[in-house]
Amino acid sequence: MPKQDAKLYDLLDSQDTKAVLDEILHILSLLGMDGHMDRFVSAYEDIQRLFEGDYPGYRESNTRYHNLEHTIMVTLGTARLIHGCVEGGMRFAPDNILTGLLAALYHDSGLIQKAKDRKGTGAKYTIGHEKRSVAFMRQNMDEKSYPPEQMDDCEQLIKCTNIHIPVAEIDFRSHEIKTLGRIVGSADLVSQIADRNYLEKLVLLFKEFEEAGIPGF
């Protein structure tokens, strides 16, 4: 198409889960992660089912800002930042890269209500939702037979999405995991602010904070 007619959504539609997955898998191939793609796709599909109401025991996501689009864009942002770091000379073990991407996928799963929870929306869990996210992560990863050490690392990375917890206070197993924690936390913020519809979506975030009773929202 003519250059002047190109639109941002021609590059990547952030609401197209298949397109976002394909982009992440392309980045993983550049990182030499072919042997880990099946495990990532399995988790990606579970998170999609969770947010869409097809995961046993859970309701469909009803938080209008922290939705599936936000989650997959944070995951894409994580993949892009990791790739940039590698291009800049940093090195990460493939298992650790996968852990970083999984943390991004799971980081807001704690905002999904369980099937019997019919009061309000998942936004009421905003304060402390990271603990609920960790609980779901451990349940899901345990079902897929991930080692406990990898689940522990994933928990520390999810904590990095809580802006009220200083990174210095998080107990990381290694410097590499700490770096990945910073990447995941950065991706969570950058994916919000870089969203071309961020200003329009702020009213949705406001409503979530209102329901959660966050002081000074």
Image: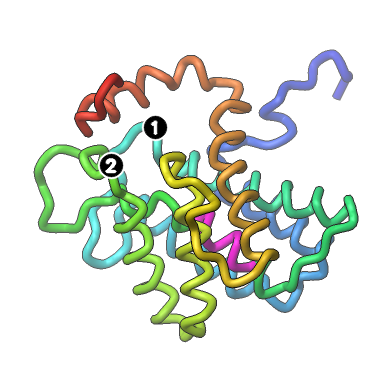
Total numbered labels placed on residues in the image: 2
Viewer-nearest residue: 54 or 148: 148
Quarter of the picture containing the N terminus is top right
Tell me the residue at 28%/23% (across/down): 207
Task: Identify which residue, 196 or 127, lies in the foreground.
Answer: 127
Q: Is residue 109 left or right of residue 150?
A: left
Q: Residue at x 73, y 78 (%)?
A: 35
Residue 79 in picture, x, y percent from top left: 69, 53
Residue ID for mark 1: 65
Mark 1 or 2 closer to N-term? 1
Residue 203 rendering spot, x and y as whole percentages: 36, 17
Mark yes or no: residue 192 visible.
yes
- Residue 88, percent across and down? 88, 51
Q: Decide whether residue 125 is among the magenta residues.
A: no
Q: Residue type at mark 2? A: Ile
- Front one among 45 and 75: 75
Q: Quadrant of residue 197?
A: top right
Going by the numbered disc 1, the residue's amino acid type is Tyr
Image depth: mark 1 or mark 2 in front = 2
Magenta part, dominant SS: helix
Real-space Cα separation, disc 1 to disc 2, in angstroms = 15 Å
With respect to residue 211, does 117 lie above or below? Answer: below
Q: Which residue is mark 2?
A: 127
Residue at image position (45%, 58%) is 106
Q: Please state the extent of the stretch shown in magenta in the rendering.
A: 98-105
Q: Taking the image as drawn, is residue 19 in sight?
A: no
